[in-house]
């Protein structure tokens, strides 16, 4: 679990603000759920034989003896909340949320035990048009973050649960012949969750999979038509993608469309956004049958990617714009007052007032360290003449005496270029 330090938070705020802005453009509404839910909710939605439920959840008993779990993902809680408050009855919804998720995984680059996701869930829409909208929206987000050239889209259809059942039988039949040659995880999954074997990274298993039956041949008519139409819509929107027949996703609740946005710049942890359709989940959790599709995006990976590629805009930093110093006790009250006036006049700028006194030299040192482009110096002389000294900190321009009432104007001009 990581601390996010003051030097790093501007990047987080930049990414969060960009996502918030793009989602707002499409009319998605934010929902905030608790980070703790009944353990049973995750077992029923994510599936008992998934990595998450089998070995990654932070589960504990509270004082009443109820089994609770720190949320490992947001979809289950979002569906629970939407159902509980009647948000899904006879209506469509476009929802999003952001926050911490918890999984007890082996920590490594791009994989943490507390991490942050932005999740989007759409309810009540059956067609491939909303699937397409989600992918168009993410493409716009990559554009806004400067990542368009570094994110590629893989899509697949995994059909309905009935068509997957038939396929699962065929796959297990085929893999049984090679049971001894499969990697240990896949051998175990043969009994529990055979579709996940398609996802195996083991070279030997991959070789065996080359001859395996293809999910595509088992797709039901409706899923195939849905997928074909989705591809048409993506083509029309100019969204590039590859169809990856091995893309199955780890959670039980998906069906029909699944997708992942990947990058090649982060090594093995290359999935930055993943999702798909989950029409069966709301009913599975006790609601009325409700169409649903969504995705989740890992913020740590997104930020790591921006940093790795050097794509963080220069304006994204924790620097002050102006550092206001007060030389001598008599300058303190006027300095605080002047800073207030400047904050009224320059609401978008960061004005840091020096606190704690000290010599000219030590105050100027702090001014420099604040990253500010200008220092304002208020001493006895300036107070007497109603001026302030305006000192550029990042270039060799000379210091200037400016009447206090003209300071905001002078700063505004200088800071804008
Ligand atoms: P992976 O295959 O990388 O384990 P996943 O299938 O478990 O991913 P999802 O549950 O679909 O991931 O979560 C969506 C996104 O959340 C991932 O694509 C990734 O960007 C991010 N993510 C998942 N687990 C972690 C983690 N432990 N630390 C940081 N980010 C994560
Ligand atoms: Mg995982």
Image (cartoon, rainbow, N blue to C red):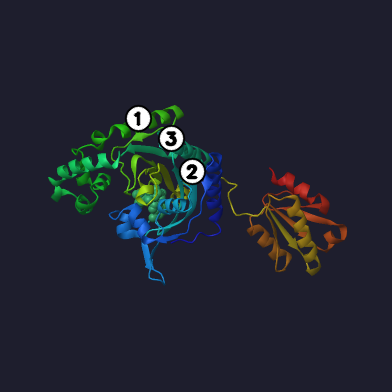
Query: In which quadrant of the rendered image does the N terminus lie?
Result: bottom left
Q: CA distance from mark 3 to mark 2?
A: 16 Å
Task: Look at mark 1 in the image and give the residue it sits on.
Answer: 228
Q: Which mark is residue 38?
A: none
On screen, residue 414 above or below 135: below
Picture quarter with the C terminus: top right
Residue 312 visible? The answer is no
Residue drawn at (49%, 50%), measured in percent from left and top? Answer: 97
Q: Which residue is mark 2?
A: 93
Residue 96 percent location from the top left of the image = 49, 47
Mark 1 Cα-neighbour bin, 10 Å: few <14, some 14–19, many ≥20: few
Q: Nearer the viewer, residue 342 or 258?
A: 258
Q: Which mark is residue 132?
A: 3
Camera-nearest label, 3 or 2: 2
Q: Which residue does the image show at 30% across and 43% down from the upper left? A: 248
Closer to viewer: mark 2 or mark 1: 2
User: Callout 3 environment at 10 Å: few (<14), some (14 to 19), or many (20+)?
Assistant: many
> Quick one: SS at disc 1?
helix
Where does residue 247 sit, x and y in percent of width and height?
31, 41
Q: Quick one: SS at disc 2? A: strand
Camera-nearest residue between 399 and 348: 348
Ligand 1 within 8 Å of the CB at mark 3: no
Badge 3 vs badge 2, beta-carbon distance below 8 Å: no
On the question of residue 62 being in view, the answer is: yes
Separation (CA) of disc 3 from disc 1:
12 Å
Element class at badge 3: helix
Q: x, y (%) of residue 408?
A: 77, 50
């Amino acid at each position: 679990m990581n601390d996010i330090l003051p030097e790093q938070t501007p990047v987080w705020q930049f990414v969060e603000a960009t996502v918030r802005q793009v989602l707002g453009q499409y009319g998605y509404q934010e929902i905030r759920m608790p980070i703790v839910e009944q353990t049973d909710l995750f077992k029923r939605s994510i599936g008992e034989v998934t990595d998450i439920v089998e070995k990654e959840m932070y589960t504990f008993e509270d004082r009443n003896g109820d089994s609770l779990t720190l949320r490992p993902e947001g979809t289950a809680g979002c569906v629970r909340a939407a159902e509980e408050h009647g948000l899904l009855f006879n209506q469509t919804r476009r929802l999003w949320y952001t926050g911490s998720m918890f999984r007890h995984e082996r920590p490594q680059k791009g994989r943490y035990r507390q991490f942050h996701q932005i999740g989007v869930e759409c309810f009540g829409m059956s067609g491939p048009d909303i699937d397409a909208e989600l992918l168009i929206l993410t493409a716009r987000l990559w554009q806004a973050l400067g990542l368009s050239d570094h994110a590629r889209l893989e899509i697949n259809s995994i059909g309905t649960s009935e068509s997957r059942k038939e396929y699962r039988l065929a796959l297990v039949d085929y893999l049984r012949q090679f049971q001894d040659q499969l990697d240990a995880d896949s051998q175990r999954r043969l009994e529990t969750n055979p579709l996940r074997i398609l996802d195996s990274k083991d070279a030997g298993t991959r070789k065996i999979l080359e001859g395996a039956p293809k999910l595509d041949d088992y797709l039901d008519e409706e899923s195939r038509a849905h997928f074909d139409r989705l591809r048409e819509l993506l083509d029309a929107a100019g969204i590039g993608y590859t169809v990856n027949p091995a893309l199955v996703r780890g959670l039980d609740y998906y069906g029909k469309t699944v997708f992942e946005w990947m990058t090649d710049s982060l090594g093995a942890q290359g999935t930055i956004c993943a999702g798909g359709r989950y029409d069966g989940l709301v009913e599975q959790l006790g609601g009325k049958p409700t169409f649903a599709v969504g995705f989740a995006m890992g913020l740590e990976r997104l930020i790591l990617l921006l940093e790795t590629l050097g794509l963080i805009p220069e304006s994204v930093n924790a620097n002050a714009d102006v550092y206001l110093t007060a030389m001598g006790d008599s300058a303190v009250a006027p300095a605080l007052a002047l800073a207030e006036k400047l904050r009224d006049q320059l609401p978008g700028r960061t004005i840091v007032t020096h606190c704690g006194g000290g010599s000219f030299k030590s105050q100027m040192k702090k001014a420099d360290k604040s990253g500010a482009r200008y220092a304002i110096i208020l001493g006895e002389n300036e107070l007497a003449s109603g001026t302030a000294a305006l000192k550029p900190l990042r270039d060799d321009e000379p210091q200037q005496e400016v009447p206090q009432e003209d300071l905001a104007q002078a700063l505004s001009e200088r800071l804008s270029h």
